[in-house]
Amino acid sequence: MSNGPEPSPPITFLGEFSKKLVTNTFFNLLGRSWSFLTTLLLTPFILKHLSVGEFGVWVLLSVFTSSFNLLDLGLGSSFVRYISAYHTHEDYDRINEVLFSGLTFYGLFGVVLTTVGLVVEKPLFAWFRITDASGVFLFVLLACSIQNISLMFLSIFKGIQRMDKSNAIEIKMSVVNVVGTVLFLESGFGMRGLAMNALICAVISTVLTWYTVRRYVPKVRLGWHFNAGLLREMFAYGAKMQVSAFGGQVCFQVDKLIISRTLGLASVSFYEVSSRLTSVMRNIPLVMITALIPVTSELEARNDRAKILRTYYAASKYVCMLAVALIAFLVLEAKSVVSLWLGGGFESSVILIQILAIGYGVNVMGGVASQTGAGVGRPEFDMKSTLLLAFMNPILSMSLVRRFGSAGAATGTSIAMVSAAIYLLVIFHKHYLETSVWTIIRDVQLRPIIAGTLANFAVLGFHKILPQVLEFEKVRYLIPLKILADFALFAPIYMVLLIALRQVTKIDWNNFIGLVSFGFEFLRHPFRERVKIYR
């Protein structure tokens, strides 16, 4: 019997980084960085070929399909966890059952998704005042249905922790998507071209992913392996994850629907620009924890709780340092970034970016608890915090949007995200770690927040002393110089403060040196190191 809460584990790995975790994180970073780059480059290109209203319609179509996907009852979110657990014991028969059962469901689900979408198309479009999108929705629905199967196949590589393969496929498909987008838009197909391109990419992705699975994991097959009991078990697990997916949909998408209904489609475009940029900021630190679910699932299968706790504290520490730096710098440079990225005409997006950056950033800081909980089979922590988020966000956004416009919706979203993240940490620490949430705030989060705030004030003081730097914002090709000058001041001050406040220790420095050394060795001999790590 326990005599009390377990003592807090050290908040670093003490030099015992799992090479597999680090390597998978590296490949996830590579894949996501490519995705971020293509998103940032394609957005102004798409805006050049679509009107602001058309771009708003395209955004809403993606919101509709992602909302319809919630009808899969959470099955999609269960594949990685189950495949990872079965792969730990090399139980390929069960993995085959997972896949065939999932494929059977998604085949039927695709028919239902497309049918329901076409039935509700007219009233849905009328409600949100969407015109000039005839025939586009069918392509989007078909693309979404096929893409679900592709993502299920991709879960195999994620579940067996071969992020090198999953990211290689995603990078290849992003290239296909970019080429298709350029060709269709330059040919004058507009939104219909984007929808046709999405369908073509979904088909190619499905074929390519399955071919790669069969080539590298030949024991995985799609014979008749239907298991209704296993499917029900996956649904039971996925249902809790689905609540989180629903909350995410509410958090990241419902504000666009509210803005569309109250302010019009053009306002959706300005809000989407802000959301895309802050999403990139949010996803950069999230890349650091994308490998946590399969890793913690494997550790849970091995009953290694001590390593799970060390992983949680160390990941939280490094994610927080990166997230706070990104939040602070994006808030500081929002005007410069928008001007450089899109030119003139999008000044109203600046305040939206600054507001959303805070909410999205705090949301990231709860991500480690969310991923760890899901990996150890306790998705209810994220589920409960997401319910709070789903309740608060639409109420706050609707109450603020009429008075403050798009900024009101952004504020409502940020307040809801901050509240839900705090609640997640509280219940995760209380019911799983059996420690006070104050330990993570004190040991992990507080000092980076202080350092980021002081670093921002230092840059603002620099602008007061040398106001000529701000003049660079008026000339687009000089904006990078202004951003680089600010970063050259912000980054060292932030790091010095972290060291002075003892957030970065000698252990962290040794970890960093070890990672750099490992990284160089990996780059010099990638094939040899991959064989050693993934053997």
Image (tube, rainbow, N blue to C red):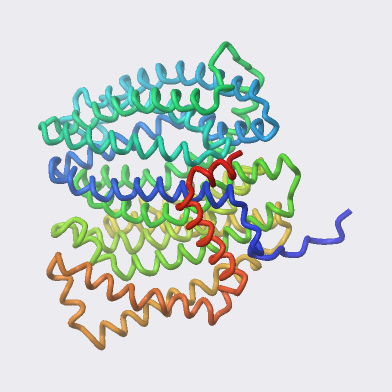
Q: Position of residue 444 (x, y in %)?
A: 58, 68
Q: In this rendering, would 254 be left or right of 121?
A: right
Q: Quadrant of residue 56?
A: top left
The answer to whether residue 146 is seen in the rendering is yes
Q: Is residue 508 above or below residue 151?
A: below
Viewer-nearest residue: 75 or 504? 504
Q: Residue at x 64, y 55 (%)?
A: 311
Residue 534 location, x and y as percent? 58, 40
Is residue 394 visible in the rendered image? The answer is no
Instruction: Work out which residue is located at the far right of the displayed protein and give it.
Output: 1
Task: Name the side, left or right, on which 11 lies relative to 345.
Answer: right
Q: Nearer the viewer, residue 329 or 510?
A: 510
Residue 13, how many percent across, how many down?
65, 61
Determine whether 433 is above or below 250 in the image.
below
Q: Nearer the viewer, residue 449 or 310?
A: 310
Residue at 59% across, 74% down: 505
The residue furthest bottom is 465
